[in-house]
Amino acid sequence: MTSAPRPRDLRAELAGLTTEAFRPELSEIDRLPTLEIARLMNGEDALVPAAVARRLPQIAAAIDDIAARMTRGGRLVYAGAGTAGRLGVLDASECPPTFSTDPTRVVGLIAGGPEAVVSSVEGAEDSADLARHDLDALRLAPDDTVVGVSASGRTPYAVAAVEHARARGALTVGLACNAHSALAAAADHGIEIVAGPELLTGSTRLKAGTAQKLVLNMLSTITMIRLGKTYGNLMVDVRASNEKLRARSRRIVALATGAPDEEVERALAATDGEVKAAILTIVGGVDGGTAARLLEESGGHLRAALGATAR
C-alpha cells in the first residue's frame, strides 16, 4: 500500500494543481466594493460552461456506457469527499423524485458517511480503505458504474473507489478539475474539466464545484433520457409525492396529449396517477391495464409503447 505523502511533499503537490493556484491580481480582493467582487465572481463562473464544453465527447462516451449497463440493471454510484461527495449525494438524491428510480439505482457515497454531508469528518477523504469498505457494502457487479469525483483529482478516497471498482469489473469514470490527474488515469473514462484557478485560492467549492455539478447533472439526466425516463423534454416518470408534483403530473399529461383537464384527470385516475400510462391511454386509445402491459413490454419507453398501439 502506498504511504501517505509527507506534509512537505503534499504542499508541493498541491502547489502544482491548477485548482490550488494563487492569483496575485486578486490579492487585494477584500478591499474592493462588494459589487465589484460580485462582478469578478460572476465572470469566473461564466468560464465554467466553456470548460465543460471542451469535454463533451468524453462525457457523452461515458453516458453511453453508463446507460448500456443501467439498461441491464446496473447501478450508478458516485464516490467523493467534501464538496465533491456532497454534490454526488445531491445528484443521486434527486433521481427518485425526478425519474421514479429506486433509491438503490443511483447512489451517492461520501467519505465519512451521511454525517459528512453536513459536517467535516476528520481524515475521511484520505482513507483508501474507507472507500473500499463503502463499495464492498454495495456488493458491486459488472454492470454497475462508479464515478469518482474529486476537484484535485488526487483525493485518496475517490481514487481508491475507482481503482477498487475497476478491479471488481465495474465501469469507472473519474471526474476531476485538473489535467493529468491520478483519478482520470485510473478510470475507464477520464473527464477533466479545467476551468482555471479559483477566485479564492484553493476554494474548490466555487468553479470546480460548479463544473462537477454540471457534469453530474449530465451523467444522470442524459442517462435517464436514454433509459426512457422522459418523453421529449417532459419528466414522464416523475413521482407525484406532494401537491406540487401532482399538479406537475397533470400538466405533463396535458402538454404531452393536448387533452382537456377533465380527460387528463380521468386518465390519471384510471392509471393510479402514472403519467406514462395516462398519456398512453389518451394518445394510444387503450385502457389502463393495456397501457401498463405495453409499458412493461417496452421496458418503460413511452415512445416504443405508443408505437405498439399504432401497429
Image (cartoon, rainbow, N blue to C red):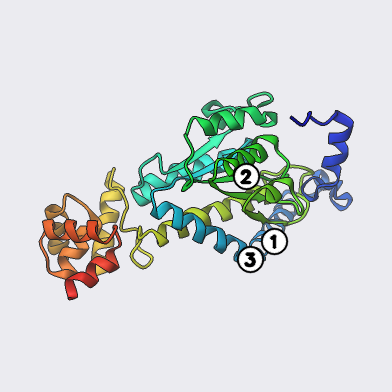
Quarter of the view holding residue 255: bottom left
The reply to whether discs 2 and 1 touch (Cβ–Cβ < 8 Å) is no
The answer to whether residue 125 of the structure is visible from this angle is yes
Of labels 3 and 2, earlier in sequence is 3
Element marked by disc 1: loop
Foreground mark, 3 or 1, reads: 3
Q: Quadrant of the N terminus?
A: top right
Quarter of the view holding residue 15: top right
Residue farthest to the top?
122
Please state which of residues 143 and 13 is positioned toward the viewer in this rendering.
Answer: 143
Q: CA distance from mark 2 to mark 1?
A: 20 Å
Q: Position of residue 146 (x, y in %)?
A: 55, 45
Count of labels shown? 3
Q: Which mark is residue 177?
A: none
Determine the residue positioned at 36% across, 68% down: 232
Of labels 2 and 1, earlier in sequence is 1
The answer to whether residue 111 of the structure is visible from this angle is no
Element marked by disc 2: strand
Determine the residue positioned at 16% across, 67% down: 282
Q: CA distance from mark 3 to mark 1?
A: 10 Å
Q: Disc 1 marks which residue?
A: 47
Q: Disc 3 marks which residue?
A: 53
Q: Disc 2 marks which residue?
A: 149
**141 vs 43: above or below:** above
Looking at numbered disc 1 in the image, what kind of residue is underneath it?
Leu
Residue farthest to the bottom?
311
**227 vs 94: above or below:** below
Element marked by disc 3: helix
Looking at numbered disc 3 in the image, what kind of residue is underneath it?
Ala
